[in-house]
Image (cartoon, rainbow, N blue to C red):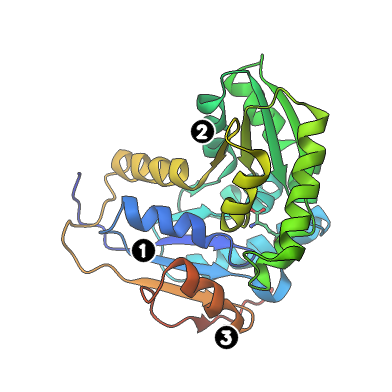
Amino acid sequence: MASGTDRRPIGLFDSGVGGLTVLSALMDRLPAESTIYLGDNARAPYGPRPGDDVRAFTLECTRWLLAHDIKLLVLACNTATSQALPEVRAASSVPVLGVVRPGALAAAAATRSGHIGVVATTGTVGSGAYPAALGEVAASLHVTQLACPRLVPLVEAGAREGAEVDHAVRGYLGELMEADPAIDTLLLGCTHYPLLRPLIEQAVGPRVAVVDSAFSTALAAEDLLDALAARAPDGGAATNLVYTTGDLAAFEVVADRIFPGALPGVEQAIVTAD
Ligand code: DGL
């Protein structure tokens, strides 16, 4: 593992708790790196919002993270990546990684039939970012997308199981698999959805590989830090700070399920338009 001297944190952004799935993969892969996570829970979900709102909110949160002296920004949100990545890159003084390309690479590597299903928010599906990214990897891939707008509010509310979420997951995935029964790979194109992975895997059955962008985004971050010679020293004390614009207690309930006892307290962020 490469070791360096750049102790500045990696910034991660999501509309809410979903990007914690990317944070978790990043902490596993790069334990020496400090991180600072911002969830814009006060304005989540982003999925149903017009693109102009997603871009404006994402840029505000980007400025907040840049003010915390980050060395790399990870847009740990597909909706923000698919609708705001060029604008964020233009506004950022540090390199920016999105989650769409890493997710597309993981799905393209996993499929055998060449038929990939993508579940995501309404905004991500409408942007066409995944069919475009998968088409860049291999033009022969057959992509079927489905927007699942009921899932993010359930995850934000802390639901991981139970009749309501099970019914929603089975309904969406039944519809997707009916649209293309040759799908052998399901790409979770929203960083909230890995939190429902057991239900999703049950609903699609063992014949379908379920992939997300968390691990491949952590690998992309590692490669980029190496290329920039911007790694933190090995064995240094990494800090992992977590902020939300929303309700602290509600955020902590979900965060604690992902990182049982492992994260320090969640703090309040005030993100402004200036
Ligand atoms: N976690 C986000 C994503 O990956 C967005 C959820 C939302 O705010 O709708 O798309």
User: Is label 2 in a helix, a strand or a loop?
Assistant: helix
Residue 249's disc number = 3
- Does 44 sit above or below residue 102? below
Of badges 1 and 2, the one in the foreground is 2
Q: Are marks 3 and 1 in contact (CB under 8 Å)?
A: no
User: Is label 3 in a helix, a strand or a loop?
Assistant: helix
Q: Position of residue 104 (x, y in %)?
A: 58, 33
Sequence-first tag of 3 and 2: 2
Q: Position of residue 53 (x, y in %)?
A: 78, 61
Sequence-first tag of 3 and 1: 1
Q: Label 3, label 1: how many angstroms apart (C-alpha)? A: 25 Å
Sequence-first tag of 1 and 2: 1
Horizontal relation, residue 175 to residue 42: left or right: right
Q: Which amino acid, mark 2?
A: Ala
Residue furthest out toward the top: 140
Circle 1 crowding by C-alpha within 10 Å: few under 14, some 14–19, many from 20? many
Q: Position of residue 75 (x, y in %)?
A: 55, 53
Residue 106's disc number = 2
Respond yes or no on whether mark 1 lies under 8 Å from ligand 1: no
Q: Label 3, label 2: how many angstroms apart (C-alpha)? A: 34 Å
Residue at 34% in and 44% down: 222
Circle 2 crowding by C-alpha within 10 Å: few under 14, some 14–19, many from 20? many
User: Is label 1 in a helix, a strand or a loop?
Assistant: loop
Q: Are marks 1 and 2 in contact (CB under 8 Å)?
A: no
Q: Which amino acid, mark 3?
A: Ala
Q: Which residue is mark 1?
A: 9
Residue 62's disc number = none
Q: Nearer the viewer, residue 169 or 69?
A: 169
Total numbered circles: 3
Q: Label 1, label 2: how many angstroms apart (C-alpha)? A: 26 Å
Residue at 78% in and 40% down: 174
